[in-house]
Image: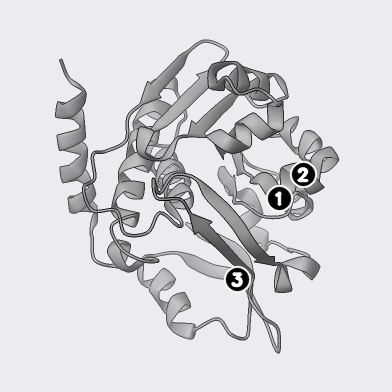
């Protein structure tokens, strides 16, 4: 896995070392001297699903002009993580060898960079977003209609995250819903959506294809990675699990869905 991003001088070096310990290539991570890392602050409702953005500080993200290392440009699987649509388009323009390109977005970019987002949607294979973002993007409160309307904007498939209710998948040929893993201990949902996308893309890259069956399995792995994330603050829970823990939870999840 290869990471491209930008952080400020306040970024702790141990975070980079942790990424490297998980076999993530950080050659594309830029540290800007004297600058501050992107910051987001929000408030969750009691149901832990609905949130309100309280503060966004773009900091280093505001001036970030990504330049991918040469070998990064040939990655077959590319995930454009949540960030400015302008930056996503700059990265996309450098990914010349990608077989699959999936992007994430959020309400901030839907509201402030809609024209750029429309262009991005026409150039990607898949989009991941949550239920409130899908409704905002399409101005439709019916998630089934919203999912298909997002797909009609360009992506071959759309994944709508629904928090404790799992996720929905939309393509031209099929629509389905996968439930969340029943997690009793929910400490902090921050980052669960990013973990979902990372787990999904990691599995697709591991399998080397994005056939319909693989996509469904990848969504399941994304759901399970997110189920671990919410069990503690930040990345603390993910630091303490291995692939075997994920596979055990997958076995439980498969049994749960069999009837």
The local crowd at label 3, few if under 14, some if 14 to 19, many if 20 or more residues have their Cα within 10 Å, is some
Give percent across and percent down for residue 224: 30, 43
Picture quarter containing residue 28?
A: bottom right
* Residue furthest right as drawn: 115
Q: CA distance from mark 2 to mark 3?
A: 28 Å
Q: CA distance from mark 1 to mark 2?
A: 5 Å
Res 211 quadrant in image: top left
Q: Is residue 100 visible?
A: no
Residue contact at pointers 2 and 3, CB within 8 angstroms: no
Per the rendering, the mark at residue 236 is none
Q: Is residue 123 above or below residue 206?
A: above
Work out whether residue 225 or residue 181 is closer to the camera in this orientation and state it: 181
State the SS at label 2. helix
For the question of whether residue 156 can be seen, the reply is yes
Is residue 184 left or right of 95 when viewed as pictured? left
Residue, disc 2: 111
Q: Residue at x 66, y 25 (%)?
A: 150
Is 67 left or right of 187, judged from the image as shown? right
At mark 1, the secondary structure is: helix
Mark-to-mark CA distance, 3 and 1? 24 Å
**Residue holding disc 3:** 29
Q: Tell me the mark number nearer the camera, choosing from 2 and 3.
A: 2
Could you tell me if the residues under marks 1 and 2 are in contact, i.e. CB atoms within 8 Å? yes
Specify the label residue 108 is tagged with.
1
> Reading the chain from its start, which is encountered first: label 2 or label 3?
3
Q: Residue at x 37, y 66 (%)?
A: 235
Taking the spot 73% from the left edge, 24% from the top edge, the residue there is: 153
């Amino acid at each position: 896995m290869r990471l491209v991003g930008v952080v400020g001088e306040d970024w702790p070096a141990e975070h980079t070392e942790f990424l490297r310990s998980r076999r993530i290539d950080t050659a594309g991570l830029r540290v800007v001297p004297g600058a501050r890392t992107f910051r987001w602050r929000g408030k969750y409702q009691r149901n832990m699903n609905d949130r309100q953005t309280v503060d966004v500080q773009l900091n280093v993200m505001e001036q970030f002009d990504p330049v991918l290392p040469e070998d990064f440009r040939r990655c077959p699987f590319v995930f454009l993580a949540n960030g400015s649509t302008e930056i996503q388009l700059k990265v996309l323009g450098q990914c010349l060898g990608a077989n699959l390109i999936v992007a994430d977005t959020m309400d901030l970019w839907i509201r402030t960079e809609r024209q750029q987002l429309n262009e991005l949607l026409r150039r990607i294979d898949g989009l991941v977003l949550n239920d409130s973002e899908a409704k905002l993007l399409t101005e439709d409160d019916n998630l089934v209609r919203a999912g298909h309307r997002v797909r009609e904007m360009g992506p071959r498939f759309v994944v709508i995250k629904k928090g404790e209710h799992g996720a929905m998948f939309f393509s031209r040929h099929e629509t389905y819903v996968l439930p969340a893993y029943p997690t009793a201990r929910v400490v902090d949902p921050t980052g669960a959506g990013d973990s979902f996308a990372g787990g999904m893309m990691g599995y697709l890259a591991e399998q080397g294809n994005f056939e319909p069956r693989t996509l469904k399995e990848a969504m399941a792995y994304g759901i399970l990675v997110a189920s671990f994330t919410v069990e503690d603050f930040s990345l603390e829970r993910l630091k303490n699990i291995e692939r075997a823990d994920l596979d055990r939870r997958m076995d439980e999840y498969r049994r749960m869905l069999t009837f």
